[in-house]
Image (cartoon, rainbow, N blue to C red):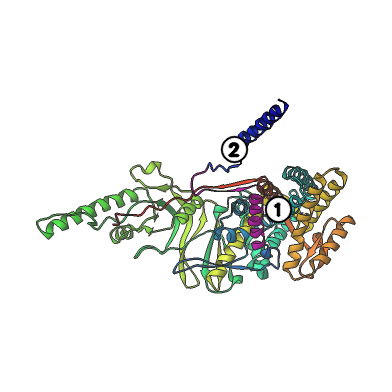
Amino acid sequence: MHLMNDHSDVIAEMSVCVCVCPQASLSMTPMNIFRHGADEEKAETARLSSFIGAIAIGDLVKSTLGPKGMDKILLGGGRDSVVTVTNDGATILKAIGVDNPAAKVLVDMSKVQDDEVGDGTTSVTVLAAELLREAELLIAKKIHPQIIIAGWRKATQAAREALREAAVDHGNDELKFQQDLMNIARTTLSSKLVTHHKEHFSKLAVQAVHRLKGSGNLEAIHIIKKLGGSLTDSYLDEGFLLDKRIGVNQPKRIENANILIANTGMDTDKIKIFGSRVRVDSTAKVAEIETAEKEKMKEKVERILKHGINCFINRQLIYNYPEQLFASAGVMAIEHADFMGVERLALVTGGEITSTFDHPELVKLGHCKLIEEVMIGEDMLIHFSGVDMGEACTIVLRGATQQILDEAERSLHDALCVLAQTIKETRTVFGGGCSEMLMAKAVSDLANRTPGKEAVAMESFAKALMMLPTIIADNAGYDSAELVSQLRAAHQDKKSTFGLDMTQGTVGDMAALGITESFQVKRQVLLSAAEAAEMILRVDNIIKAAPRKRVPDHHPC
């Protein structure tokens, strides 16, 4: 009996084991909840993928950082591929197509920096990439991303406070503020193609921004590029230049002009029979249709002339017949002015773009004191002087090749944006790696006082900030380890205005050298890079949608 009981216990136990095993194997079976073709990266794989993509973007643009940074050639696809030579971070990142999601975040951040403050596009990308490089090392040491983020947030706050305390405000002292603007323009242009002519272009940029009278409306500054001459032949013209020609037999010079700016069709004096069928009994009937078209056009021109104008500028074409009518009335007619040109012209002359002409009393005309033709290089342009908007001006850029002109325009645009921001926010900080080292010192001091793992994250933030002066020195071909250690020692010795002098390859006083940057740009670089790096660090899963299937086209046209 005892034997029977023992056997029954063993059998019961065996049966239990048999029941459990199928359940265990069921729970271990991987379940795919996504559509066929969708892809998923989890945990460490997703994080590693994000880090690699972001760091690759940082490595791509970091060689362009600083006054001795190198340029990139961007070659477009297609038969007539466009060649672009630039060292502007936003331009490079806009031109390359990236597939990595983290890399796309950095590209978008660089575009926002360009739109928001105009400069610092390379710095913000490199700082975000260096932060993620440091985060990769911390995660390898099994420090949780949320602890790193908590440390970074405190570090960002400390860096921001240090930057704010170091900022200098000369907004109330006109002479010193003028000097600040010149220094900021020089510093911004020193890392661009026009660095050898930065004195000339700094004056152009500061004069143009001063004409805005604090409005910050950069639309009033028109930049025209004309091949020929050298960069030093570029100049600022007080007025507005339109790259178009005046119609045949029309006045070439008009004083006290009343300008009607329009976007209307003036090309219907010839019969159009594209895609339509017109049946007539004889050619005389065709002539009748053409005469009717001409009458309609004549009536339209008469309605336009009732506005009491002596200059008509149209966004669209003006055909021969209406051009003759305008010439007979002694009105200057300019056709096919590009849309940006028309928009800007309406802004600076104080007029509005019109499409209908039935109510002259409701139309707002533009005004200027003189319209005349001027020659720049080998081209004739139309010059509007004494415009209603006194702050309007045109910068004419000259250069040997189209690539030089394009890069000079990008450089000047960056300088104009930074100066317009500085006039609104008058605080300035010192450049040359001085601000970064100042912030790194403040973050390191906070880390030394902070217990726990967050202190390690703060140290990594300080290291990432110190990488910016390191890269600037490396790009100039100097010994970065030696220079950065000297700079760190100088800041520990309370020399808080010291930075890297890349002309001599030494550590120097930025206040004496006049290497100044806008506080707004530096603050934006710090905050944008920290936010973007934090967002990428939070990622632990990347889910890619299934690609759209190609359906064969059985009905080709």
Distance of mark 1 from mark 2, alpha carbons? 45 Å
Circle 2 is placed at which residue position?
22
Range of magenta residues: 34-61
Q: Name the secondary structure under disc 1.
A: helix
**Type of residue at label 2?**
Pro
**Type of residue at label 1?**
Leu
Q: Name the secondary structure under disc 2.
A: helix
Residue 484 spot, x, y in % from top left: 82, 62
Which sits earlier in the primary sequence, circle 1 or circle 2?
2
Eye-nearest disc, 1 or 2: 2
Specify the quadrant that holds the C terminus: bottom left
Specify the quadrant that holds the N terminus: top right
Question: Does residue 420 appear in this view?
Answer: no
Residue 69 spot, x, y in % from top left: 68, 67
Residue 402 spot, x, y in % from top left: 53, 70
Is residue 289 or residue 1 the one in the foreground? 1
| Residue 425 numbered tag | none
Circle 1 is placed at which residue position?
132
